[in-house]
Image (tube, rainbow, N blue to C red):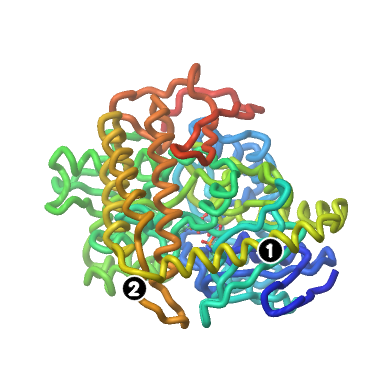
Amino acid sequence: MTEITLDNDLVSHDIIVIGAGLAGLRAAIEIHDMGMNVAVISKVHPIRSHSGAAQGGINASLGSDDSWEAHAFDTIKGSDYLADQDTVEVLCKEAPERVIEMENWGCNFSRRENGRVAQRPFGGAGFPRTCFAGDRTGHNLLHTLYEQVIKRNIRIYSEWFVTKLLVGKGRCLGCVAMNMADSKIVAFRSEATILATGGYGRIYQRSTNAIINRGHGISLAYNAGVPLEDMEFVQFHPTTLFGTNILITEGARGEGGYLLNKDNERFMERYAKDTMELAPRDIVARAIQKEVDEGRGFPGGFVHLDLRHLGKDRIDKRLAGIRQISVDFAGIDPVKKPIPVQPGQHYSMGGVSSDINGRTPMTGLYAIGECACISVHGANRLGGNSLLDTVVFGRRAGAAAVEHVRLSGREDEDVSLDVSGKMKRDEEKEIGDLMTGEGESFATIRDELQSVMQQYAGIFRNRQGLEHALEEISKLKKRASKLKVKSRVKVFNLELMNALELKGMLELGHVIIMGALAREESRGAHYRTDHLERDDENWLKHTLAYKDEEPRLEYKAVNIGMFQPQKREY
Ligand SMILES: Cc1cc2nc3c(=O)[nH]c(=O)nc-3n(C[C@H](O)[C@H](O)[C@H](O)COP(=O)(O)OP(=O)(O)OC[C@H]3O[C@@H](n4cnc5c(N)ncnc54)[C@H](O)[C@@H]3O)c2cc1C
C-alpha cells in the first residue's frame, strides 16, 4: 500500500509510528527498509525529542574480555531481579550489532588511542561498557538516525499532536491527531501503530526530563484499555544540578568524580563500599537523600560532586557539556569548584506492557522505548541501557509490525472508516467543550500534582503518605474534569495541549501511587520505609494496571532464566 490521502480529514499509511525519538526513528527505518509505507508523527521536531538530551552513553559488550552474559548479569542484578530475563538476553546479545550499526551510519563516538570506540565505566556495570560521544551521546545518535530517515524520504508529520488511538473490534486502527499549526483534527488510519512517545518525568516537581515528557502516549494506551506494567518503579537520578535539576551525567562519576557531604566525607563508603560512586542509581540516590535528611548535606538540600582532580583537559575532552551546564545554570566552573547536586526524577521503568517484539496485548498496537515496559530494566535501570533499549527494540518492533501487516491484510476497512469518522468527531466535540465556558486552568492542578508526586511517591515512600496522595489525586481528577482552556487561538494553542496532557498525567500519577501502595516491599527504585526488605516470596512479580474508576491491579510472573535471584550487594 502506498500513502493515500483519502480526503483532508483522513490520512492512511501502512504503519504509523507515534514519536520521533530514537525508538520511533529506528522503528521507522526498519519498516521502510522492509518495503512498507511508514509515517512518523511527533509533537516536536524530531531532533527536539528528549533522546537528544542523553549525555553519558550507550552500553554494548564490545571489549574482548567482556561478554553479553556479563552485561545480562549486571542488568538483571541492577533490576533487582524484576527484569524478564528473556528480553534482557535479547537486549545484551543484540547490543554490539546495533551500536556498530550506529557507528557505520555516522555516529561520531569518542575513540581510544588505537582508534577503537572508547567505553567508560557506568554504575552497576562490572566492566567499562558504555560507549559515548563526549557527554552528548544522545544528540549524536539522534542526529545520525534523523539523517538516515531524511535519506530514505520517510514522511514525518512534525508538530502534530496525537490525542487518541483509534480502536475498533479490539484492534488498533491508527490514531487521531491535531495539526498544531492550525488545530485541525485528522484521523490517521494504519494497519499497525507503534507508540514511541517517551517518559512521563514531568509529573514530578524535580525532573531531568524535557518539559515535553508528560507520558501522553502511555495514557493513550491506558485509556484504550491496554495495561500498564510496573509503573511504581520510577528512577531518581542521583546527580541533578541543584536549582534546575538539569542532569549531571553518571559519566562524570564514571570519569572519576567523587561525591562529598558538607563534612567533606566521601560518604558512599557507608552505602556501597566496593563500588562507591558507581553503585546503581537507586542506591546512590537514596544515599544522597539520606545524607541530606540526616543533616550532612548543604543548606537547601544538596551534596557536592567534585571533578577538580580530573583536571581541565580531561573535563574539556570528556565532560564539556557538563562544564558548560554548570557554568551557565549554576555559575560554577567544575574545573575550580565542586558541582552542587541533588537527586531528581529521571526515568520511567514502567510503561505500556509489551513483549520481546514490542507487541502490546492489543492487536495492531506496539510500544517501544521509554513509554514501554518490555521489561528489560525491572525495578531499576542501569545507565546506558535505555539508549540501547530504544534501538534494539525499535528495530525489532518495526520488523514485527511489518510481519503483522503482511499476515493480517486489510480486512477491516469498513470498520476502520466508521471508527475514524466517529472518533474524529468525538475528539472535535471534546476539544470544543474544553474551549467553551469558564473553569479552572490546567496550571494550578498540574503544580499540585507535581508536588504530591514529589512528596509522597518519591525516593522514600510509606503507606500513610501514599494513602494521602491517593486522596489528593482523586480530588485533582475531579477538578480536572471541569477545567477549561481560556485561549481560543487556533495556531499553536499550547494551553489546549497542556490541558489535554494534564488529564493523562493525572491517570499516570494515580497508577503509580496505587502500584506503590500495593507493593509492600522494597525493590530497586521502589523503597518503602515501612517495608524495608525485598520480598521474593510475595512480590517477585510484575504489576499490571488496567483502566477503571480506580486503576485495577493484576500481577504477572517474572521470566527467570540463567540467573536466580540473589541478595543484591555492591
Ligand atoms: C537528560 C537525560 C539524559 C539521559 N542520558 C541517558 C544516557 O546517557 N544513556 C541512556 O541509556 N539513557 C539516557 N537517558 C534516557 C534516554 O535518553 C531515554 O529513555 C530515551 O532516549 C527515550 O527515547 P524514546 O525514543 O523512547 O523517547 P523520546 O526521545 O523521549 O521521544 C518521544 C517522542 O514522542 C513524541 N510524542 C510524545 N507524545 C506525543 C503525542 N501525544 N503526539 C505526538 N508525538 C508525541 C515526542 O514528540 C518525541 O518525538 C537520559 C534521559 C534524560 C532525560
Q: Quadrant of the C terminus?
A: top left
Residue 154, placed above or below residue 412: below
Query: Distance from label 2 to label 1 (Cα)?
Result: 28 Å
Q: Is residue 97 visible?
A: no
Horizontal side of 507 relative to 11 (left or right) equals left
Q: Nearer the viewer, residue 45 or 83?
A: 45
Identity, as a three-letter code, of the amino acid under mark 1: Ser
Q: Position of residue 189 (x, y in %)?
A: 72, 65
Q: Position of residue 384 (x, y in %)?
A: 52, 52
Q: Position of residue 93 (x, y in %)?
A: 70, 45
For image coordinates 51% across by 52% down, the residue present is: 219
Q: Position of residue 145 (x, y in %)?
A: 64, 70
- What residue does disc 2 label? 486
Q: Quadrant of the N terminus?
A: bottom right
Identity, as a three-letter code, of the amino acid under mark 2: Lys
Q: Residues within 10 Å of mark 2 (few under 14, many from 20)?
A: some
Q: Nearer the viewer, residue 18 or 501?
A: 501
- What residue does disc 1 label? 420
For image coordinates 42% across by 81% down, the residue present is: 489
Query: Which element carries disc 2, helix, strand or loop?
Result: loop
